[in-house]
Image (cartoon, rainbow, N blue to C red):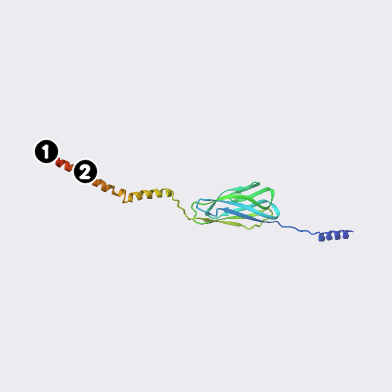
Amino acid sequence: MKKVLYSVILLSILIIPSKVFAINGTVNLKCTPTSVFAGDAINCTIAAEVTDGSITDFSATTTLSDNLEFINATPVTGWTGTSNKGIFSLTTTTNQTDSFEIASFTVKMKNDATGSGTVTLNTTKLGEITSVAPVTQNINLSTSTSVVDTNAGDATEEEDVNADIKNPGTGSNIPFMIIGTGVIGAIVVYELAARKKKIYKI
């Protein structure tokens, strides 16, 4: 009887197909902007994609190059835990599947930065997954400068004023007119004085 029972169980295992799915997942990091000046802030978002299962916890460490510094971090609504200084240990009560965001954080290009930098996220745990490839974002330090001429609107007026002063047909003749008027006035005074002398002699 026992042999028959064992045979039935073995036959059932062979006939009924069984399939075990292994959970798979990846972690993504997106930082914007990717080109900044010294002293500028960069906002980064951590997201994940899970297939063949769900996850409820996430652990990772952020590594920054020397010219970047960590500012703050904020878990996405529904996630709680530690997210200080780029060290994340978060959990959620909702099973996360497909694509979803986990947290966001802000870094800053140092004021004395002299070159570009990198932000690297090393995930140590994504649900049951303990082997997740690290992701890196490059942050370029911009050295270009743009000069805005705030007096651009006044340039035309200044040029017009200078043009009037230099115009030989108008203001440039004023000194000669003054000199000419003075000479004529002197001659008139001299003539009047001479006539008075003649009258006195008579």
Q: Say which residue appears at 24% left-offset and 45% top-offset.
A: 181
Left/right of residue 194 with respect to residue 129 in the rendered view: left
**Which residue is at the front of the view, 20 or 85?**
20
| Residue 137 placement (x, y as % from top left) | 57, 56
Q: Say which residue appears at 67% left-offset and 48% top-offset.
A: 92
Left/right of residue 97 with respect to residue 29 in the rendered view: right
| Residue 178 placement (x, y as % from top left) | 26, 46
Which quadrant is home to the N terminus? bottom right
Q: Amino acid at mark 2?
A: Gly
Q: For the residue carrying disc 2, how many other residues have a C-alpha within 10 Å: few (<14), some (14-19), or many (20+)?
A: few
**Which residue is at the front of the view, 134 or 33?**
33
Q: For the residue carrying disc 1, how many other residues have a C-alpha within 10 Å: few (<14), some (14-19), or many (20+)?
A: few
Q: Say which residue appears at 17% left-offset and 41% top-offset.
A: 192
Q: Say which residue appears at 86% left-offset and 61% top-offset.
A: 7
Relative vertical location of residue 175 with respect to residue 5 in this rendering, above or below: above
Marked residue nearer the N-terminal end (2 or 1)? 2
Q: Amino acid at mark 1?
A: Tyr
Badge 2 element? helix
* Residue furthest to the right: 1
Which quadrant is home to the C terminus? top left
| Residue 117 placement (x, y as % from top left) | 54, 56
Badge 1 element? helix
Number of numbered discs on residues? 2
| Residue 141 placement (x, y as % from top left) | 51, 55
Q: Which residue is labeled 2 in the image?
A: 185
Instruction: Using the numbered discs, state the Cα–Cα distance from disc 2 to disc 1 in whole angstroms.
Output: 23 Å
Q: Which residue is labeled 1 in the image?
A: 200
**Which residue is at the front of the view, 45 or 114?**
45
